[in-house]
Amino acid sequence: MEDLISIIIPVYNTHQYLEACINSVNNQTYANVEVIVVDDGSNQKTKNKIQELSTKIDVLLTQENSGQSTARNLGIENAKGNYIVVLDSDDYFESTFCEKALKKIKQNNEVKIVTCRANIIFNNKIKDIFIPKGGDLSKMIIKNTAMGSCMFKRKDWQYVTGYDEKMRKGFEDWEFYIRLLKNGGYVFVIDEVLFNYRRHTLSTTTKANKIKYDLLKYIYLKHEDLYKLYFKDLVDFLLNKIELEEAQKIKIYNKIDYKIGSFILKPLRFIKK
């Protein structure tokens, strides 16, 4: 019998995107999947949409709003498959993702996470294509090298005790991946656009970027032992980032419109002072 893939979809107030999300997993070319939806305390509009799509859902779980990490863990705890795909409810996969991801993760025991290239969608239009870096812990410890929606083995999730449920404001997938790769293995990136990621003002990623330094501090301190091992790589990464930001500032300062604006505002600033 074919391996069962359990697809976990945490849902929170995404009624307008949910149908496309669930259709994308029902339309996979790999047929042996179970669809597990976790309603994370959604509003009534979203609950109505879940009910409307109930025939396309194998397992429906509900909880009070507790965050994405808790919802994912609850879904995986109730999963029957040995292979897990997590999917945010405002995003969607192309039809061949499960088939191709399963093939790659079964080919090599060193593959712990399978991700792919992704369309970045803004205002329902493809804005860009994102290519995750992939690689082992030495790459992951510096920066998230996979998409938040991906495939991994249930036994690996169990071994690292799941997602960190204290992380309710973002970056929880990156921190989880660090623990998945801590004892070896790597992220494999399928060299095709098989995922569609919606970027909007209310997305978890957008919210996380507003408090990213607090989230980075939490991850750095939680994995202090690992960052000591990769201290030079971290320093190189941070200094390079600072250098790029400073170069960008200089570029902005040298633009003619910036100089004109500064010239016009100079007397007003003098008066204010």
Image (tube, rainbow, N blue to C red):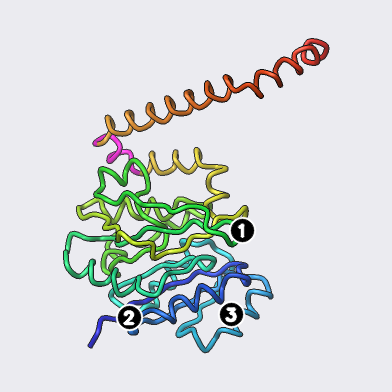
Residues at marks 2 and 3, CA–CA distance in whole angstroms = 23 Å
* Quadrant (top left, top right, bottom left, bottom right) of the N terminus: bottom left
Q: Which amino acid, mark 3?
A: Ile
Front residue of 215/34: it is: 34
Q: Main secondary structure of the magenta part?
A: helix
Which residue is label 3 attached to? 50
Q: Is residue 267 magenta?
A: no
Please give the name of the residue rendered at 44% of the width and 40% of the height, measured from the top-left corner.
Answer: 216
* Foreground label between 2 and 3: 2
Q: Residue at x 32, y 50 (%)?
A: 178
Q: Of 7 and 74, which appears nearest the observer?
A: 7
Dot 1 falls on a residue whose secondary structure is loop
**Which percent across, then down, holds residue 205?**
52, 52
* Circle nearer the N terminus (2, 1): 2
Q: Amino acid at mark 1?
A: Asn
Q: Residues within 10 Å of mark 2 (few under 14, many from 20)?
A: some
The range drawn in magenta is 223-229
3D distance between C-alphas at marks 2 and 1: 30 Å
Label 2 secondary element: loop
Of residues 95 and 51, which is closer to you in this image?
95
